[in-house]
Amino acid sequence: MMITEEKFYKNRRNFLKLGAGALVANEAIAEELLKLKELVPSDSEYAFNYVNFYEFSTNKSDCVEYAKKSNLEKRAINIEISGLCENPMTLNDISQFKRVDRVYKLRCVEAWSMNLPWGGFMLKDLIALAKPTKEAKYIKFTSLYDPSIFPDQASSFGVIEYPYVEGLRLDEAMHPLTILATHLYNKPLLAQNGAPIRLVVPWKYGFKYIKSIVKIEFTNTQPISTWQKYNPKEYGFYANVNPNVAHPRWSQARHRVLGSFFKEDTELFNGYEEEVAFLYKDLDLKTNF
Ligand SMILES: Nc1nc2c(c(=O)[nH]1)N[C@H]1C(S)=C(S)[C@@H](COP(=O)(O)O)O[C@H]1N2
Ligand SMILES: [Mo]
């Protein structure tokens, strides 16, 4: 324990000395830091059964039932990469990217959390391949639209607008903590978790983790995300986990850890402040929520 802590603080000092700009450059230190921060994964039953996937249903267990019939797991990765970049392409082969395995805390805006062991690759590796032009400032993601498998897309009383859309600033997308996940608990993603590929951004609320991605575009204007469009007073573009900014209808100061009886304090940037705060040094987090 002592050794681990000593190593952690020593590394943290080096890390801070290198400064924000070096974060992306010095991946080795970032990986080391993450290892020392590693969490104990939650029981996989929560991850597989307590899900939000509105295309299937707003009911968490109905999602799982519809997901079983969807065949989403059998779909090949097929992402159209377009917009402001030098190498637009259709991405099918992800074997070219270095595999990363990360246990991150997922904090849902609904005030619960779980620790999830993801497998995938860093989004920045894909961005390097696509080569965004200097005009590109944002990245926009789109989920699959297929009313034949998604009941809420087929319904005329659909809850939200489809397809589900999300966005990141390009520097957030290039951060080494941001990954595209293909695996969860060392198994290919289940349909209900966003097969075959989904986004994971651990310092943001879970609704940013867009599932079943079919399109990625580089843009110079800030994309409007699905939840922001649904209710801009309640859901912002940034959606950074922040205990000091309440949702208009509930506090974000604490959350329930699934599988634990107790609630715990929510941390700024979901506990990843050391790694990501530099991205927001010029931003008022209260107005840019
Ligand atoms: N396409 C799509 N992606 C989505 C959602 C959704 O409804 N549709 N729900 C989001 C929300 S609110 C959360 S908390 C996470 C949940 O991921 P999980 O169910 O795999 O834990 O997925 C996010 N990604
Ligand atoms: Mo969520």
Image (cartoon, grey):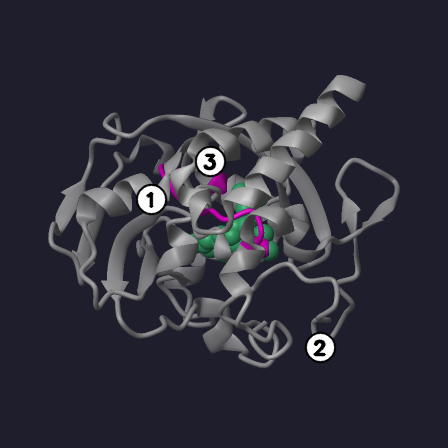
- Percent coordinates x, y for residue 43 in the rendering: 69, 28
Circle 1: element type: helix
Return the residue at label 2.
Answer: 248
C-alpha span from label 3 to label 2:
35 Å
For residue 73, which quarter of the picture?
top left
Image vertical order of residue 58 relative to residue 31, above or below: below
Whether residue 57 is visible here, answered yes or no, is no
Image vertical order of residue 189 relative to residue 198, above or below: above
- Percent coordinates x, y for residue 212 in the rendering: 37, 46
Based on the picture, tell me whether residue 198 belongs to the magenta stretch. Answer: yes
Image vertical order of residue 171 relative to residue 10, above or below: below
Q: Amino acid at mark 3?
A: Lys
- Percent coordinates x, y for residue 48 in the rendering: 58, 34
Circle 3: element type: helix
The numbered mark, 3 or 2, whose residue comes first in the sequence reads 3
Q: Which residues are magenta?
A: 192-206
Q: Nearer the viewer, residue 243 or 12?
A: 12
The quadrant in which the N terminus is found is: top right
Q: Is residue 83 left or right of residue 21?
A: left
